[in-house]
Amino acid sequence: MDSNLTNFKTVSNFARTKIVATVGPASRTPEVLSELIVAGVDVFRLNMAHGTKEDHELAIANIRKVADEMQVPVGILVDLAGPKIRLGKLLNEPINLINDEVVRFVRGTESKAPDELTCLYQPMIDEVKVGDAIVLADGIARLTVTKKSADELTCVVVDGGTVRSRQGVNLPATTLSVPALGEVDIKKAIWAAGQNVDFVSLSFVSNADDINQLKSLLASNKSHALAIAKIEKAEALENLDAIVKASNGIMVARGDLGVEIAIEKTPGAQKRIIKCCLQHRTPVIVATQMLESMHTSKTPTRAEVTDVANAILDGADACMLSGETAIGQYPVAAVKMMNNIALETEASFQGNSSQVTAHAGNQGWDVFDAVVFGSAQIARRVNAEMVVIVNTSTTAALMKSKQRDFIPVLCITDDPQSYRQMCLFWGIIPTLSAVPITDIPIRTYVDDWTKKYTDFETGTPFVIVTDMEVLKGIHDSVLVATTT
């Protein structure tokens, strides 16, 4: 019997808030991947906007090889790029847009005059209206459309800056015809299904239908990956409740979100998204520029540390590193720093019973939901050192993670993908059984596990939660036992 976990004392030094790290040139080798796991990474992200299929397949192979050798659960998230709109080729490279200057968007993909801009999204001129804003290069420059003809938009520069070919174009006030799940992303989602990844995220989601299309596509390709909606459009905020209900997870993608809405509204939007996810018991990842300065610095700024801490205090299940681990100079240091920030932040609300109530979720409970929730109350009353959940799927683990208490939670499953997917759930320690959970002698399993990975004394109480039939005719049980 092997729990596939490293030493429990080491694991307990990792934060309950999970860490998602982006894999790139700085981190795709087995040596660096293993260091990142030791530092605290729970899920690795593959950004489909960069790299080749061969790059990503090599990264997946290396992640799985390292995780198997270390006998630890590690999830893999494929992040689809979505309909990112980009500038065409400029006549001069770069160009400096000056306030009050007039420039023109014309059809085509290459500018033929210094005051011309083009866009690779050809319907742009048809769909943008007079008065709409056009934001370039992730907010570096902002234009307002003052005149429109059949083949041209006349714009005035409201906020100038230097832009280059193929940088991003955001149209926050424009309803676009381009689907969130386009032809390129469909092919990449099918590829991800074939790679048996654990999570697939969709960019620029506008409504619940977008994420339902992704879920249907994954299911039709025999994938059980969890579908994650990236919130980065004003339309998504308008349809937030329905999107969260439809999704298996949410990512607060603050880069494009901070361009699509006024940047000063982004913190409030983040809090609102997290709160909605907590209410619906949906895992939520906070992403973008969390430790941005660690691309080139061994230490983050104080503002970045505060940003990570506030995301955790708001109730994020996970925080994500992007360029910090993909192309940064200090990928391992960035993960260690995020883990340390999370540990310190979590300590500030440890033992706060109101935190449990606030994060438990309150909609759509069935009997097993209530049993899982009640297990935390019982565990506190009997001073239990651990809660043990025995469940093939991730349902009970997700419910338990939203309670936000600090009793260690061991989740036993016999499903390898559930084992990896639980890596995204706050405070959960997944363990994989080599035999079907219906055949596990639970008491013996827990006794063996605690002797191997903890320093629990004989007689230490723990609580078991299971939806299996423990006694004839009885299921959805909470049991209290002690170590032997």
Image (spheres, rainbow, N blue to C red):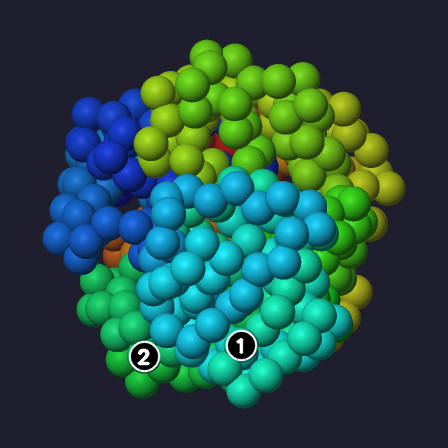
Query: How crowded is the residue under tag 2: few (<14 C-alpha within 10 Å), some, or many (20+)?
Result: few
Is there a contact, CB below 8 Å, between mark 2 and mark 1?
no
Give the residue drawn at x 44%, y 67%.
119
| Residue 31 locus on image (x, y percent) | 19, 25
Residue that numbered label 2 is attached to: 183
Which image quarter: residue 345?
Answer: top right
Name the image quarter holding residue 190: bottom left
| Residues at marks 2 and 1, CA–CA distance in whole angstroms | 27 Å
Residue drawn at x 39%, y 69% as measured from the top left: 120
**In front: mark 2 or mark 1?**
1
Q: Looking at numbered disc 1 in the image, what kind of residue is underneath it?
A: Glu
Q: Position of residue 260 (x, y in %)?
A: 65, 59
Observer-nearest residue: 295 or 35? 295
State the residue at coordinates (13%, 53%).
54
Image quarter of residue 77: bottom left
Q: Residue furthest top?
A: 298
Residue 116 visible in the snapshot: yes
As helix, strand or loop, the secondary structure at mark 1 comes to strand
Q: Nearer the viewer, residue 472 or 352?
A: 352
Quadrant (top left, top right, bottom left, bottom right) of the N terminus: top left
Image height of 91 relative to 237, above or below: above
Q: Position of residue 196 (x, y in %)?
A: 25, 63
List the residue tagged with mark 1: 152
Out of 12 and 425, give the one closest to the viewer: 425
Q: Which mark is residue 86?
A: none
Is tag 2's residue or tag 1's residue first in the polypeptide sequence?
A: 1
Give the amino acid at mark 2: Glu
